[in-house]
Image (cartoon, rainbow, N blue to C red):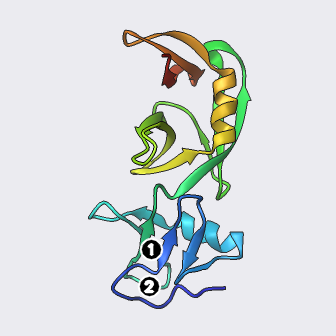
Amino acid sequence: MPSVAARAGEPGLRIDRRGVWSYAGEPFARKDMVCLLASRLRRAADGGYEVLLPCDPQPLPVAVEDVPFLAVEVFVCGAGDAQVVSFRTNVDRIVTLDAEHPLFLAEDPESGESVPYLSLGDGISARLSRPVYYELAALGEARQHDGKDVIGLWSSRQFFVLGTMV
């Protein structure tokens, strides 16, 4: 298991696009260690990410390839505008899709495609895994939203756009 005690000019702690946490190039083997570090993750003043370790007043910088978390499972309760959609992240955090935790789309710089994300709060987001996104798309409904034909879904009495119809 890698140690996170050492510091260097560049962050040795990294989170890759697949949500794999590593230190000095060595992936963490224990999920409980990743969950502990994830619980201490925050946005840095410069817009990057850092982990505040309980035994160290100096935050440890974290290089994040895309976003720090993935939404890997979806739970749906109810129907129509009373439906509530929640997600489990790769670090077992449960987040309900609502006004404080909305979905948003961002363009992938390599493919140009829209990629769905979930805001977790405090400037931290999770990318929806492909299976989760497909599950949401299957639940989605077509409608007009802000003058566009879109596919979206209801959660917590709000409509969230999954994508525009071509």
Q: Of the residues shown, which amino acid type is indicated by label 2?
A: Asp
Q: Quadrant of the N terminus?
A: bottom right
Q: Residue at x 46, y 56 (%)?
A: 66
Q: Position of residue 14 (x, y in %)?
A: 49, 72
What residue sits right under mark 1 in the picture? Answer: 52
Residue 112 visible in image = yes
Q: Residue furthest front?
A: 111
Crowding around mark 1 (Cα neighbors within 10 Å: few <14, some 14 to 19, many 20+) is: some
Mark linked to residue 13: none
Q: Position of residue 29 (x, y in %)?
A: 70, 76
Q: Which mark is residue 56?
A: 2
**Which residue occupies the foreground of this view, 141 or 89?**
141
Q: Considering the numbered disc 2 on the image, is that residue within a helix, a strand or a loop? A: loop
Q: Residue at x 63, y 20 (%)?
A: 140
The answer, for residue 157, to whether it is visible in the render is: no
- Residue visible at 64% across and 26% down in the picture: 137
Task: Name the residue at 47% across, 55% down.
Answer: 67
Residue 145, x across and y down, in percent: 43, 12
Marks 2 and 1 in Cβ contact (< 8 Å): yes
Q: Residue furthest bottom?
A: 6
Quadrant hosting residue 156: top right
The amino acid type of the residue labelled 1 equals Leu
Q: Identify the secondary structure beneath mark 1.
A: loop
User: In x, y percent, where is residue 82?
Assistant: 64, 17
Mark 2 and mark 1: Cα distance apart in space: 7 Å
Label 2 Cα crowd, 10 Å radius (few <14 / some 14-19 / many 20+):
few
